[in-house]
Image (cartoon, rainbow, N blue to C red):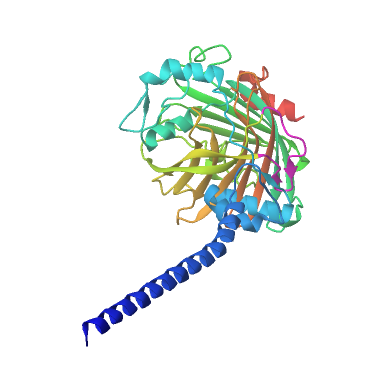
Amino acid sequence: MQVKDFSIFLWKLKRETLIKNILTSKIKKTVFYILMLGFIPVLVIADENRIKPGIIITQKNYKNYLPDLKKLLSAGGYDSVVNGVENVRINIPVVKKINYPIPLKYGEATKKYSNRCSAGKRNELIGWVSGLPFPEPKNGLELAWNIQRRDQITDQMSFYTEFLLFDSSGRKTGKIERSIRAHLYNRYYIGRHTIPPIPEEPGNNGLIRLKESMVVIKPFDVKGFSMIRICYDPLDKTDDCFSYIPAIRRLRRLTGSDVTDPVLGCDFCYDDFETIRQKINSKMTFNLLGTKDLLVPIHYTKIPSNHIQADCYQWEWEIRPSWILQYNINDPGYAYSKRVIYVEKELPTADLYGADNYDLKGRLWRTSSMIAHAKDAKTFDANCWYGAKWIDHISGHTTLQPMWPTFADPMATKHAFTIRHLLQEAR
């Protein structure tokens, strides 16, 4: 081949290669654009199906939000919400996360006393007087003590409540299986921060932490049933629990195992009150499982109207950061093997948003969920609930517990924790 011919050959080869590269480049870009045009709607749809402030989850659109609901709710909360929007037809309006004020008196007590608190080797709490022991918990035990000493009531309170029982079919139809109305009293003996005497009842000397009582007002067949519980503060001192049973006209002292028996056929036990009434003891261990964003009802200072819908509540919801804490009971004689509890992380109050409780075989058994907190409008102290819900995942049974609290109730005196006083009220 001559030099001239060879030059022409190289020129043609470069030209063909250049054209090929240009065409290939155009094809790649064309394919890229086609893929992007197909992917953008997917991104838009995915963004539309994210749970965020401003959306309202309803019976018509809830299936689009199931992946996010699974991420943002506990096991019990997911079950409750999905059943609620699907069958009861509640809706879930999601609002922007609210910046709540720190409770006034409880916050002052936390600032004054928290720097002297520590946790001992036997799980005991050392140096606590009032307020939140550990504003920045470093481990599961410290968070567990925050739960035990969380912001609650105005040192003493009472509330009327109903236990609305639903079987598995009633959860879908809204038909109530049974309704029980009761009046409950609470009075704290230590850690008082709002109502004198502060910080402790005179002469108590750290013995009694709390007294609570309950009397059933209706229906007639259980009217007059009464319960008194004296919660002692020392770790190894067992609480005293008494109940009066009208049918046999007898006062019965409950044993340690009785506090995990269902209350009047409901889906919770005495140790499930306020999510957890169970005492910390030296056998327990605690695992801080981390944090997660949780979809929870907003805190209320006024009861919303028409909030009870079958076995659900109609609330506004927000997404809040929460701790996830696992209680390992380590007691084969206790009803649960472990509890997984969801705790407010941002506010120094240790507000509880529910718990998943597991039986001795490790199965999810009872959960508390959809708890809406009630707060005093002026000080944001006086934490109670407007509503709680328990689900028995094994039987499919649920109990709804709406509440109507009276903060700083002057009637919650020491007399409110006697059987005589409770029976007089029942009459």
**Quadrant in which the C terminus appears:** top right
The image quadrant that residue 13 belongs to is bottom left
Q: Position of residue 402 (x, y in %)?
A: 69, 38
Count the marks: 0
Residue ID at (48%, 65%): 32
The image quadrant that residue 128 belongs to is top left
Q: Position of residue 80 (x, y in %)?
A: 63, 50
Above or below, 261 relative to 274: below
Above or below, 412 relative to 373: above
Q: Position of residue 250 (x, y in %)?
A: 64, 36
Q: Residue furthest bottom?
A: 1
Nearest the eye: 66 or 359 = 66
Above or below, 137 relative to 296: above
| Res. 170 in view | no
The part of the chain drawn in magenta is 301-316
Q: Is residue 302 magenta?
A: yes
Residue ID at (60%, 26%): 186
- Side of 1 relative to 124 (left or right): left
Nearest the eye: 142 or 279 = 142
**Quadrant in which the N terminus appears:** bottom left
Residue ID at (59%, 60%): 41
Q: Is residue 299 magenta?
A: no
The image quadrant that residue 235 belongs to is top left
Nearest the eye: 160 or 137 = 137
Q: Position of residue 206 (x, y in %)?
A: 44, 19
| Res. 296 in view | yes
Chief SS of the magenta region? loop
Above or below, 342 relative to 159: below
Nearest the eye: 281 or 19 = 19
- Side of 43 relative to 81 (left or right): left
